[in-house]
Amino acid sequence: MTTGNGGSQTILVVGGGISGLTAAVEAAEVGYSVILVEKNPYLGGRVAQHNKYFPKLCTPTCGLEINYQRIRNNARITFYTLAEVEEITGTAGHFSVRVRQNPRFVNDKCTACDECSKACTTQIDDPFNFGMGQTKAIGRPHAMAFPARYVMDATFAKSDEARKLAQLCPVGAIEPDMEAKTVTLTVGSIIWATGWQPYDPGRVRPYGFGLYANVINNMRFERLSSGQGPTRGQIVRPSDGKAVKNIAFIQCAGSRDHNYLPFCSQICCLASMKQATYIREQYPDAKVTIYYIDLRAMDRYEAFQKKVEADAQVHWVKSKPARIDEDPKTHDPIVMGENTLTGERYAERYDLVVLATGMEPNSATSPIPAADVRYDDYGFVVNGQNGIHAVGCSAAPVDVASAVQASTAAALKAIQTIRQAGG
Ligand SMILES: Cc1cc2nc3c(=O)[nH]c(=O)nc-3n(C[C@H](O)[C@H](O)[C@H](O)COP(=O)(O)OP(=O)(O)OC[C@H]3O[C@@H](n4cnc5c(N)ncnc54)[C@H](O)[C@@H]3O)c2cc1C
């Protein structure tokens, strides 16, 4: 579709998390053509990996499913999965965008009948669960994945077993020789919604992540608590499968520290409070300790904080722990530091420690492949530049409600870009 002066009326949305999905459906539902490009084999982004949402503690699946439904019902939205933008040239109203689509090795004839996955004998570390547990080398990326199309691991695709499975597929959907494709799109404006990745807790060396099995980060804890996760929702220790009855959360694990991630991600305090409720619900006798510098539960979230604070089994220690050691016999993590309020030194033993690590913008490590894009000091995209609009965690560390609001606004901004370029 083009405007009067030949400009394109199509909007490109890069990133299919809650921000990109929202922007895409909002723009399409007022009549604009939208192309959505997502790197993963499924849409939904990080929200798809969450167990529950604060503050209502409902599952993220319903919110995502509504958006998938809106996509299914709207012929104006085209989406590519396993795809990334390689280059953007041109100006507002007249962008040319080169997109690489990586092979899924399963074509769109797939009916998700599961015959291939049942027959497959090869397991790989499950990327959806951050490698906690394994999954078949061909299968649905996760139980609620949209599109419900299977994907084959790229290394496995080269194996003899992959070829045997291709013979087995009743509808001829498996193509181990599938290759990457490049498509060039002409679009009028771009919404950048590539979101965030968990800050690498291994960089905070005194906390022993990667060395100690029972020190994990908050996103792994989301998966560990999920009924679709590696333990089917049983919150147990990675080292020995023992029930987690005494757990510590360490806030600002790397955050607000110029040696690591200098900014506050805004959601980590709330995420730990939410995760404290997972434990307390599953083990009524469990004890939770939250180590914090100061607690940040903005505006309407204060009521949620008060609810968690009302639980006498949740303890709050104002302190930034200095380090974590491990008891080599039991694999219990031992948290050490000084209580800022009392001045007392402590060395406390836990079943499991969760590092509340922040959200690092993907744009810091994979910048927008276009000339003259500006970023702030932390790698977030400065919003509203020359027809490229950044939303959600590409623009700032935000919760889902704020991401949805900003994405709805960005759909309008993208439409304005097109109209202005069209004269
Ligand atoms: C432990 C934890 C718990 C949380 N719990 C809650 C909660 O309970 N409630 C709440 O409101 N918020 C919560 N949040 C925050 C929530 O995760 C974010 O608000 C939300 O993920 C923002 O969505 P987004 O679409 O901006 O980014 P993302 O969810 O990161 O989505 C970005 C999408 O872009 C894709 N992408 C990345 N790079 C590219 C590329 N180059 N090309 C194409 N696609 C790309 C990604 O694969 C992904 O699908 C939590 C955060 C953490 C860390």
Image (cartoon, rainbow, N blue to C red):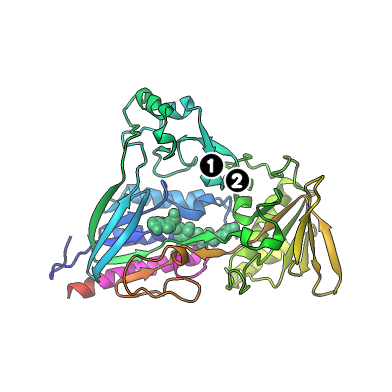
Q: Which mark is residue 276?
A: none
Marked residue nearer the N-terminal end (1 or 2): 1
Nearest to the eye among marks 1 and 2: give it.
Answer: 1
Question: Element type at marker 2?
Answer: loop
Q: Is mark 2 within 8 Å of ligand 1?
A: no
Which residue is located at x 41 percent, y 46 percent? Answer: 41
Q: Is residue 137 left or right of residue 296?
A: left
Residue at position x 35%, y 55% in the image: 84
Residue 126 point in image, percent of width and height:
53, 42
Is residue 30 among the parts visible in the rendering? Answer: no
Asked if the magenta segment contains residue 77, the reply would be no
In this rendering, the answer to whether 271 lies above or below 420 is above
User: Is 414 contained in the magenta span?
Assistant: yes
Disc number placed over residue 126 in the picture, else none: 1
Q: Point out residue 196 in the picture as x, y percentages from the top left corner.
A: 49, 61
- For the residue pair 33 and 97, the one nearer the viewer reads as 97
* Quadrant holding the C terminus: bottom left
**Residue denoted by label 2:** 226
Q: Which residues are magenta?
A: 394-417
Q: Amino acid at mark 1?
A: Asp
Rate crowding at label 2 as few (under 14), some (14 to 19) or many (20 or more) other CA atoms within 10 Å: many
The relative height of residue 239 versus residue 222 in the rendered view (above or below) is: above
